[in-house]
Amino acid sequence: MKVLLIDPCWYSLQKQSNYISSVGLAYLGSYLKNKGHECLIYNGDFILKSETTHGDLLIDYEHYVSNIESDNNPYINKTLEELGRVMEEFKPDVVGITIITAKYGIAKKIAKKLKEINPKIKIVVGGIHPTSLPEETVKEEEFDIVVRGEGEVSFYNLIESLEKKKPLKNVKGITYKVNKKIIENLPELRVEDINSLPSPEWDLFYKWEEFHPNSFGSIISSRGCPYDCTFCASKRLWGRKVRFRTPKNIFDEVKNTHKKYGTTIFRFNDDTFTLDNKRTTEFCNMLIHEKLNIKWGCDTRVDSIDLPLLKLMKKAGCFQVCFGIESGSKEILKVIKKGINLDKVRTAFKLTKKAKLESVGYFMMGFPTETKKQVWDTIRLCDEIKPDIFRWSLATPFVGTELYEIAKERNLLPKIKDWSRYFVYSSDMGLSENLTKEDKKELLEEIRKRSKRMSKRNDMKRKKGYFLHPIETSKKITKKVFNFSSKILKTYT
C-alpha cells in the first residue's frame, strides 16, 4: 500500500520555518518500507523555506493561535495546497498524522482537506495526544483510527488488515469507530528489542534533497523513562521500562547518516541519554576511534553524569549537554517528583564547565501550588549556576500527565478547551493558584533582563572561542527566551 505520513505545520504558524524533520515519522516510515509498503513523509513546516529563516522570526504564540482560528490563513492555505498536489501525485491509500497536543487544531484542518480530496481515504492519527485521549480523538469526524503508543507494529498490522480487507478487531493497539460506535482493541506490546527497528531513511521525506543535511541529525537511542515527573507524558508513550539500543547500533546509524546525507550535527532525543554510563562510554569510544567529523548534543539528568564521562563525551564530539532542572525550590522539586536535589544541580554545572561543554538549563514557572517566592528561588539558582543557555517555559498541564489531573482537580484548566493553547510558551499556561497577574508580569520581566545579560556574556565567550560547535545555538535560544518573556508580558500590560 501507499502510505502518506504527515507532521502538521507548526513553526510556520509562529512565523518561523523549520528544517528539523520528525524522527518519529522517520523511524515509522522506514519500518513500513522494510515491510514492503511504499511510504512518503511530509514535513508541514518545510513549505516556508523560502519565506523565513529559522531563528530570525521567533516564537509568537498568540500569532499561532490566531492563525489556527483563521479560515483564510496564507500559511495553512499553502500547506493544504501542497498536500493537495502530494495527494494527486502520490495517491496514498492511507494517511497517518502525528499529533502533539498543540497541533490538534491544525491536524483537524489537514484531515478535513484530505477527506474533501478523497472521501474514502483512511485518516490514522497517532502520537502523544491521541494516545492519551483515544476515544475523544477518534470521535472527530476527520479522524478514522487512532494508533495508541508506539506506532511501528500496530500501524503495520493495521495497514496489512486494510490492504487485505480484513476486520480490524484483531489489530492490537488501535481505537476506531464503526457506525459511530467507538471500539478500543487490546493494547499492543512494546518492541522489546529496539535494535531490531531499522534506522531512518531520510530520503522518504517529500523534497528531501532541498532539506539542510543537519535536518537529519535527530536520533532516539532508547525508549522509556524510569522517573515519575508530574509534568511529563513520556512514560505514557514509551513506558517506564527503559529499552536501550546498543552502542554499535547507534554508531552505525550516526555513521551511515553522516556518510549518506552529509549530516554533521546530531541531537539525541532520549529522555536521559547518559542513563547507562557504560553504554555511553562505549559509544563515545567508537566515535573517537572512527574519527567522524561530527558534533552532537543530548539531554540528561544532573544525577546521571560525572567528570570522566563528560570529558570523554567532549573528546567524542559532544558540544552541548542539557539538564532538566525545572525549579530552584526544594518544595516544588518534591511536588513535581523530579527526584533530584539542588546540590546535584550545582555539581553538575560545575563539572560541565570543567569539561568545557556548553551547558543548558531547563526551567519552568507556574506549577499549580507554586508561589512567587519559589519562582524567585529558581531565578536565583539560575543566577548561581550560570548555564551557558537557559530555557524558561510555563508549566503546561499536558493531557496524559499527572500535572493535568492536578490542575483539573484544582479547577485551574482554561475554561475553554482549546488544545492549540496547550504549549509551554502560551500565556494561558503557568496555572498557579498562588501567582497573580502582576506576579507573573514581574517574574517574566526578570527573566527577560537575565536573557539580555546572558546574550552579552555568550557573545564574549564566542569571540574567545569558548563555543566550538559550528552553529550559533546560544544566540538563537537567547533570543527565543527573550521573545518568550516579551510576548507573554504584553498579556499582563
Image (tube, rainbow, N blue to C red):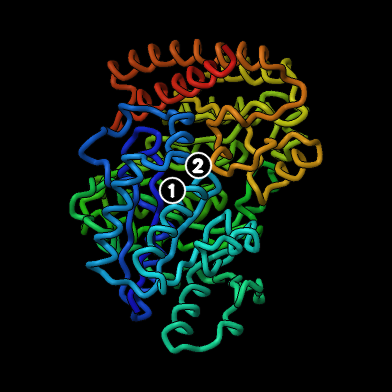
Q: Is residue 242 visible?
A: no
- x, y percentage for residue 127? 53, 58
Task: Decide: is 239 above or below 285.
Answer: below
Q: Which image quarter holds the C terminus?
A: top right
> Helix, strand or loop at disc 2?
strand
The structure residue drawn at horizontal position 36% and vertical position 58%, both measured from the top left corner, is 251
- In the picture, measured across the screen, residue 248 lies left or right of residue 304, that is left
**Given contact means CB atoms under 8 Å apart, are the residues at marks 2 and 1 in contact?**
yes
- The image quadrant of residue 459 is top left
Q: Say above or below: 323 vs 483.
A: below
Q: Dot 1 lies on which element?
A: strand
Residue at image coords 31%, 40%: 74
Residue lying furthest right in this view? 409
> What is the quadrant of the N terminus in the image?
bottom left
Residue at image mark 1: 268
Identify which amino acid the numbered label 2 is placed on.
Asp
Residue carrying label 2: 299
How many residues crowd around disc 2 within 10 Å: few (fewer than 14), some, or many (20 or more)? many
